[in-house]
Image (tube, rainbow, N blue to C red):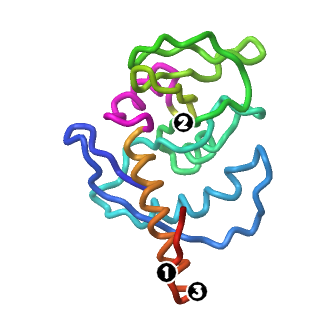
Amino acid sequence: MAVWDCEQRRVVAWAVARENIPLPYKPGRLAFSVSPPITAALLRLPQDAHPEALIVHGHGLAHPRRYGLACHLGMLHRLPTVGVAQELLVGTHDKVPARRGEWRPVMHDGEIVGAALRTRAEAKVIYVSPGWGVDLEEAVAVVMQATTRYRWPEPVRHARMRLRVAHRKRLQVIWGAPVSHP
């Protein structure tokens, strides 16, 4: 979990948590296996750094059940939540122009369930879908506000970097020797 300050344009707090998950991962049910550690990380944040909204690496409405990780976590914590992903689970979209900030709606069964968004000129699109407490335009605006020079929004990017470091350190403790990763 990384907290991004939109005015200062920097990460102001972060937390990593590890939880034993009682349910194994099954496709389409990501929320049941990753929401406990995300919740634990959220609870470990300093009180003065509590987020006003969440951006999660997963889908919201652009999900086969119309209720992905972003919907689940948003409702659980009563925070506006946006899902971002690198691949679609459902739906199609028109070609997105190569300019930063351009997007096209993702359609599934006659409904708009998300957006194919280009966060950097010429970069591959990411898929944004509203989770809980936001509409599609707000979701796109939140993602663009949290995106700087990289393709992914900064909170997601920083959280993933911190998780990789924590994972490596945990492996070193378990195995007693440094572990090299390609």
Label 1: element kind: loop
- Residue type at numbered disc 1: Pro
Q: CA distance from mark 3 to mark 2?
A: 34 Å
Considering depth in this image, is 70 or 160 the residue closer to the camera?
160
Looking at the rendered structure, which numbered label has been put on residue 175? 3
User: Which of the two discs, 3 and 2, labels the residue nearer the N terminus?
Assistant: 2
Looking at the rendered structure, which numbered label has been put on residue 178? 1
- Residue type at numbered disc 3: Trp
Using the rendered view, name the quadrant where residue 23 is placed. Answer: bottom right
Q: Nearer the viewer, mark 3 or mark 1?
A: 1
Q: Is residue 147 magenta?
A: yes
Asked whether the beta carbons under mark 3 and mark 1 sit within 8 Å of each other, the answer is: no
Q: Position of residue 149 (x, y in %)?
A: 32, 34
Label 3: element kind: helix
Q: On screen, 86 above or below 28?
A: above
Q: Residues within 10 Å of mark 2 (few under 14, many from 20)?
A: many
Q: CA distance from mark 3 to mark 1?
A: 8 Å
Check disc 2 and report the residue beneath it.
84
Looking at the rendered structure, which numbered label has been put on residue 108? none
User: Quadrant location of the C terminus?
Assistant: bottom right
Q: CA distance from mark 2 to mark 1?
A: 33 Å
Q: On screen, 145 above or below 71?
A: above
Q: Position of residue 51 (x, y in %)?
A: 37, 48
The region drawn magenta spans 134-152
